């Protein structure tokens, strides 16, 4: 593996399932009744979780009517959530139009790039014993930080009722292939991207989940806010970052307001 093009190390936390559902046409199901049933059903499932949470949002944007988000400690628990919901009375009046499985993720671009440079300087290679030992030490230090813990095991903010979820991937087009960039360049771009997001601290809470190997899309972004206009402002600012302007592919945006939630 090239020392320049190797992937960044990552830390993972809770697994995530995002489901977008809509009222089944022709069933005569009333939105108010279905939303109440979904809220109760999802809350009951969330109450039984040993760790994590589930929440429901009434969507304002198409193509769905409701967004369901579930965070759990294991992949198997997500499978159990999907299976239970499919049999629940709350799901009788809706059908799923989009879903994504992913896992809460913290990318260690800067640390991985730094260790790769150090390996080259001492005449070693990425992945050798010295590299792996230092990487494990740095990973554990990162994992123990309060900031990273919040990213890996995100909690629902009590005062941010608006939610926006969208999937995204990085481009692999000729001349715009994210995966052909050196790790140093990707680290620089992601650092700049993160600085844009930090301008919205206190106004938006962001959860990044990795979907590579699980879903068609490579990442999921879940945003919570007090004011939905902040979604527009943040996403606009970020699209002018080089990393988004050149390398980002965005999926549909699902925006609404939370009305039912359960925390473990």
Image (cartoon, helix red, strand yellow):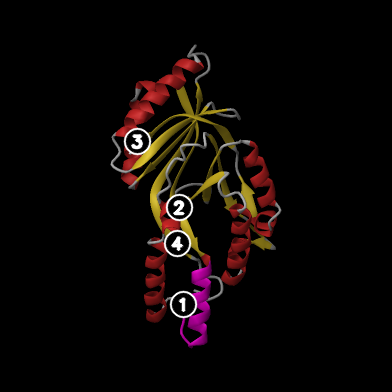
- Sequence-wise, which precedes: disc 2 or disc 4? 4
66 sits left or right of 15 in the view = right
67 sits left or right of 78 in the view = right
Magenta stretch mostly in which secondary structure? helix
Indicate which label's residue lies in the foreground, 3 or 2.
2
Residue at image mark 2: 151
Identify the secondary structure beneath mark 4.
strand
Residue at image mark 3: 81
Classify 10 Å Cα crowding around label 2: few (below 14), some (14-19), many (20 and above). Answer: many
Numbered tag placed on residue 126 in the rendering: 1
- Sequence-wise, which precedes: disc 4 or disc 3? 4
Cα distance between the residues tagged 1 and 3: 39 Å
- Sequence-wise, which precedes: disc 1 or disc 2? 1
Residue at image mark 4: 10
Does residue 178 belong to the magenta stretch? no
Residue 261 placed where, x, y %?
41, 32
The magenta stretch is 110-125
Indicate which label's residue lies in the foreground, 1 or 2.
2
């Amino acid at each position: 593996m090239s020392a320049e093009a190797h992937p960044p190390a990552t830390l993972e936390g809770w697994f995530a399932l995002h489901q977008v559902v809509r009222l089944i046409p022709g069933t005569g199901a009333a939105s108010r009744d279905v939303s109440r049933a979904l809220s109760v059903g999802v809350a009951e499932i969330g109450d039984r979780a040993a760790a994590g949470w589930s929440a429901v949002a009434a969507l304002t944007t198409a193509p769905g009517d409701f967004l369901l988000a579930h965070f759990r400690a294991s992949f198997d628990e997500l499978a159990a959530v999907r299976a239970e919901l499919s049999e629940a009375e709350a799901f009788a009046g809706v059908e799923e139009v989009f879903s994504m499985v992913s896992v809460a993720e913290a990318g260690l671009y800067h640390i991985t790039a730094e260790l790769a440079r150090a390996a080259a300087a001492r005449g070693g290679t990425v992945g050798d014993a010295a590299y792996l030992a230092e990487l494990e030490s740095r990973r554990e230090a990162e994992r123990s930080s309060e900031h990273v813990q919040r990213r890996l095991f995100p909690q629902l903010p009590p005062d941010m009722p608006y939610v926006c979820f969208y999937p995204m991937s990085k481009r692999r087009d000729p001349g715009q292939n994210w995966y052909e960039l050196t790790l140093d360049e990707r680290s620089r771009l992601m650092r700049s991207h993160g600085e844009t997001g930090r301008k919205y601290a206190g106004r938006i809470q962001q959860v990044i989940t990795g979907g590579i190997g699980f879903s068609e899309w490579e990442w999921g972004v879940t945003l919570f806010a007090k004011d939905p206009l902040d979604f527009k402002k943040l996403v606009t600012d970020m699209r002018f970052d080089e990393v988004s302007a050149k390398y980002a592919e965005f999926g549909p945006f699902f925006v609404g307001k939370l009305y039912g939630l359960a925390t473990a």
